[in-house]
Image (spheres, rainbow, N blue to C red):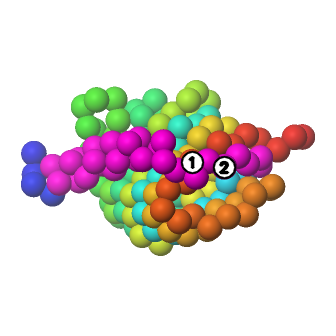
């Protein structure tokens, strides 16, 4: 395994562990409708639906999710049922079953449609149909679709 790949895998594991450890101290928000977030830092989505990610960084998704990427990058199977995507300018992750998606990067734009939970660490802005908030430090957002 190359040193660069090992470094990214180590970072990915630290990202997930850090977000899970800080979730208890995060600001807890509830939202309805599509989630839009823009900023820099770390994000973990546990959700059913579609997540569009734009910006530089890395993304880790369960192998069971359908992932479409655009741009030049690399994907690596991590051997634990997850795949690491790095260097792509845009990724779309879709899953009809609960899926974990981990993201780290700068100048990220995230758009989620579905239901689930998002843990955000860093800074930026986020909103749903009912909620507009700054994303500072740690945010734990539970979201569900808007009423039809």
Residue 27 falls inside the magenta stretch: yes
Give the left or right position of residue 9, taking residue 38 as reference.
left
Q: Residue furthest right?
A: 148
- Between 85 and 47, the one nearer to me in the picture: 47
Disc 1 element: strand
**Residue at 53%, 65% in the rendered image:** 136
Residue 118 at x, y percent in the picture: 56, 46
Residue 113 at x, y percent in the picture: 68, 47
- Between 134 and 75, the one nearer to me in the picture: 134
Quadrant assignment, res 73: bottom left
Q: Is residue 82 above or below residue 37?
A: above
**Residue at 48%, 42% in the rendered image:** 24
Q: Which mark is residue 85?
A: none
Q: Is residue 74 above or below residue 136?
A: above
Q: Residue furthest front?
A: 25
Magenta-highlighted residues: 6-33
Residue 130 at x, y percent in the picture: 81, 55
Residue 101 at x, y percent in the picture: 46, 43
Quadrant that contains the C terminus: top right
Q: Mark 1 — residue?
A: 140
Give the left or right position of residue 2, taking residue 66 as reference.
left
Disc 2 element: strand
Give the left or right position of residue 134, taking residue 130 as reference.
left
| Total tally of numbered discs in the picture | 2
Residue 118 falls inside the magenta stretch: no
Q: Mark 2 — residue?
A: 29
Verify CB contact (< 8 Å) between mark 2 and mark 1: yes
- Between 45 and 63, the one nearer to me in the picture: 45
Q: Earlier in the sequence, mark 2 or mark 1?
A: 2
Give the left or right position of residue 86, taking residue 26 as reference.
left
**Residue at 34%, 29% in the rendered image:** 81
């Amino acid at each position: 395994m190359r040193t660069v790949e090992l470094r990214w895998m180590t970072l990915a594991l630290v990202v997930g562990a850090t977000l899970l450890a800080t979730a208890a101290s995060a600001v807890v928000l509830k939202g309805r409708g599509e989630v839009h977030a823009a900023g820099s830092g770390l994000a973990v989505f546990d959700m059913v639906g579609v997540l569009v990610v734009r910006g530089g960084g890395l993304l880790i998704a369960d192998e069971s999710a359908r992932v479409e990427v655009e741009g030049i990058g690399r994907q690596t199977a991590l051997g634990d049922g997850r795949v690491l995507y790095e260097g792509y300018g845009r990724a779309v992750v879709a899953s009809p079953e609960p899926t974990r998606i981990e993201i780290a990067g700068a100048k990220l734009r995230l758009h989620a449609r579905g239901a689930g939970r998002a843990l955000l660490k860093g800074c930026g802005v986020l909103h749903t149909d009912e909620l507009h908030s700054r994303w500072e430090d740690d945010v734990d957002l539970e979201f569900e679709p808007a009423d039809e």
